[in-house]
Each structure stands twice: as C-alpha cells, then as structure tokens.
Amino acid sequence: MISYLMLFAAIALGVLGQILLKTGSVRTQDVMNQFLDPFTIGGLFAYGFGALFYIVAIKRIPVSVAFPSVALSYVVVAICAHYMWNEPLGWQQFGGIVLIGAGVLLINTAA
C-alpha cells in the first residue's frame, strides 16, 4: 500500500511541477528570465522530488504498471490547464482522457 501512496505522491508532484513550469513560462518574456523565475525553479524541484517518490514506488510496483499509471498526470494537467489558462478541453481531449483512464485502470487491475 505504501508503494501506491508513493506512486500517487510522484504523480501529484509531477502535476505540480508541470503547473509551476507553465506558470513560469507565461510570466516571463525571454528564456533566461524563465529559468530564473521562482515558479520555474519550483517546478523543477517538484519534478525532482517526484522522481524520488517514484523510485521508492517502483521498488515494489512493477515498472510496467507504475510508468503507465503516471499517465494520470496528463488527465489532471489537461483539466487544470483548461481552468487556469483557458486551454481547449473539447471532445478530442475528453476522448483522450477517457482512453488514458481506461488504460490505467486496465493495467492496474491486471497487476
């Protein structure tokens, strides 16, 4: 059970990292300032800590189950991006979200 909590933490930190990186990118005009932006730096740290949790998770969860499960972050990021930056969330994105969810569910029930 702890391994799945670690996997969930890794996914959550990956989502946080992506949101922070996007926030840092829209706040700055040039690449150098983007890399120095606190949101970008925070996003990189979130990804780094997420990787540490992921390493703990794959110690007990087969990587053939854990890695596809990380795709849940795509679902959460797409929904967050729609509400935070008004990015599209039409039928194509919804269809992709459904397929990702079904795939992750299928892989985790087979494990």
Image (cartoon, rainbow, N blue to C red):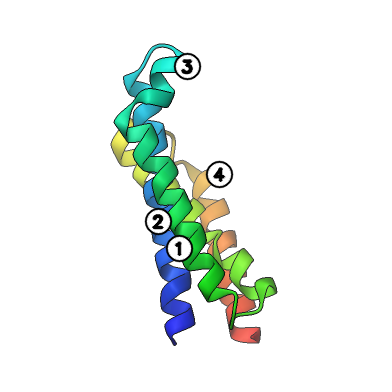
Q: Amino acid at mark 2?
A: Leu
Of 68 and 17, nearer the camera is: 17
Of callouts 2 and 3, the N-terminal one: 2
Badge 3 is on which residue? 31
Residue at mark 1:
10
| Disc assigned to residue 13 | 2
Q: Are marks 4 and 1 in contact (CB under 8 Å)?
A: no
Tell me: 74 left or right of 80: right
- Asked if 43 appears above or below 86 in the picture, the reply is below
Q: Amino acid at mark 4?
A: Gln
Q: Residues within 10 Å of mark 3 (few under 14, many from 20)?
A: few
Q: Is residue 75 in view from this perspective?
A: no
Q: Earlier in the sequence, mark 4 or mark 1?
A: 1
- Tell me the residue at 35%/45% (across/down): 80
Give yes or no for contact between labels 1 and 3 (Cβ–Cβ under 8 Å). Answer: no
Q: Nearer the viewer, mark 4 or mark 2?
A: 2
Q: Are marks 2 and 1 in contact (CB under 8 Å)?
A: yes
Q: Three-letter amino acid code at disc 1?
A: Ala
Q: State the SS at label 1.
A: helix
Side of 55 where 75 appears, left or right: left
Q: Residue tagged by mark 4?
A: 92
Quadrant holding the N terminus: bottom left
Going from N to C along the chain, the mark reached first, 4 or 2, is: 2
In the displayed image of the protein, which residue is found farthest to the top?
A: 29
Label 1: how many Cα within 10 Å (few below 14, some 14–19, many 20+): many
For mark 4, does the 10 Å Cα neighbourhood hold few (<14), some (14 to 19), or many (20 or more) residues?
A: few
Give x and y (percent) for residue 59. 59, 79
Alpha-carbon span between mark 4 and mark 1: 27 Å
